[in-house]
Image (spheres, grey):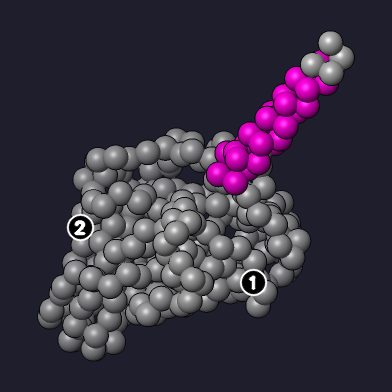
Amino acid sequence: MKAKLFFLLTAIAFSGVFLVRCNSAAGTASSGDKVTVIAQANGVSLTPFPSTKEFPNAALTYGYENGKFTVKTTNYELKKQTPDAPQLMCANSKDGQHVHIIVDNGPYDAVYESPFEKAIADGAHYVLGFLGRSYHESIKTKAAGNAIKVEVKNGNFTKTEPVKEPMLFYSRPKGKYVGKLETNKVMLDFYLTNTELSQKGNKVKVEINGKPSFTIEKWEPYFLQGLPMGKNTIKLTLVDKNGKTVDAPLNPVERTFELLDDPAPGK
């Protein structure tokens, strides 16, 4: 009887450990309000971003004429606060929902109303536009974003064509984050075109402050926790199943942002 009882308890204990490991690998395990850490490196933790307000029917179109972007949204209201913003406890725009416009994988411009003036040099460029929630998370449905290759002349698109190559665009973190509420959890978000992420396929390699940190196998936003105060640099690289850099335009991409105590120096 004792032998049977020992076997049963051992089996139950083993099953519990197995389930936690499986859920942790998927980034879904939690205990109460504690969120599972997906990965940790160099003092920085990668944790799942919570489920957020969905906009399945939202759509975006945009154009560029006389040095100005015009944007048109359907089923999506610019300058409105996304309803679940207060619960996320991360950087949120006081100006509300907006469009991210990225040219050649440079820092995005947040467009809250149309038209939006932006100078683009003559020549060939890659341009991405996508809808962003008030806390800057991209809407990743097909109709909510559009990446195109363009020719620009005198402030006008003279030729446009869909991007056919796989591409990775950097979105967040960006700029300055001030105070504990903004610096404790920093959203990592990027945008993909013509590729998917998977364990056996392409992935996104994340390097923080010059050190290899994480490899991401699922396209979704994440929280970074434990970043040091001051300036930080993130480098994102689209890699194949063997970890080699994918031959894609503007790959990899790197950005520097800053975390500041509250109040910010000089204020």
* View extreme (bottom): residue: 122
Mark in front: 2 vs 1 = 1
Foreground residue among 188 and 74:
188
As drawn, the label of residue 106 is: none
Residue 228 lies, in percent from the top left, at 74, 65
Number of on-image labels: 2
Disc 2 and disc 1: Cα gap in Å? 37 Å
| Residue on which the image places disc 1 | 212
Residue type beneath disc 1: Pro
Eyeballing the image, is 9 above or below 125? Answer: above
- For label 1, the SS is strand
Place residue 3 in its image quadrant: top right
Q: Is residue 169 left or right of residue 259?
A: left
Q: Which residues are magenta?
A: 5-34
Residue type beneath disc 2: Thr
Question: Within the magenta stretch, is there residue 236?
Answer: no
Q: Where is the N terminus found, in terms of image quarters?
A: top right
Q: Is residue 222 left or right of residue 65?
A: right
| Residue on which the image places disc 2 | 61
Residue 93 lies, in percent from the top left, at 49, 52
* View extreme (right): residue: 2
For marks 2 and 1 on the same chain, the one whose residue lies earlier in the sequence:
2
Place residue 145 in its image quadrant: bottom left
Residue 237 lies, in percent from the top left, at 49, 73
Task: Name the residue: 23% across, 88% down.
Answer: 123
Foreground residue among 139 and 252:
252
Question: Within the magenta stretch, is there residue 6?
Answer: yes
Q: Is residue 93 visible?
A: no
- For label 2, the SS is strand
Question: Quick one: label 1, few (<14), some, or many (20+) residues within 10 Å?
Answer: some
Eyeballing the image, is 28 above or below 234? Answer: above
Question: Quick one: label 2, few (<14), some, or many (20+) residues within 10 Å?
Answer: some
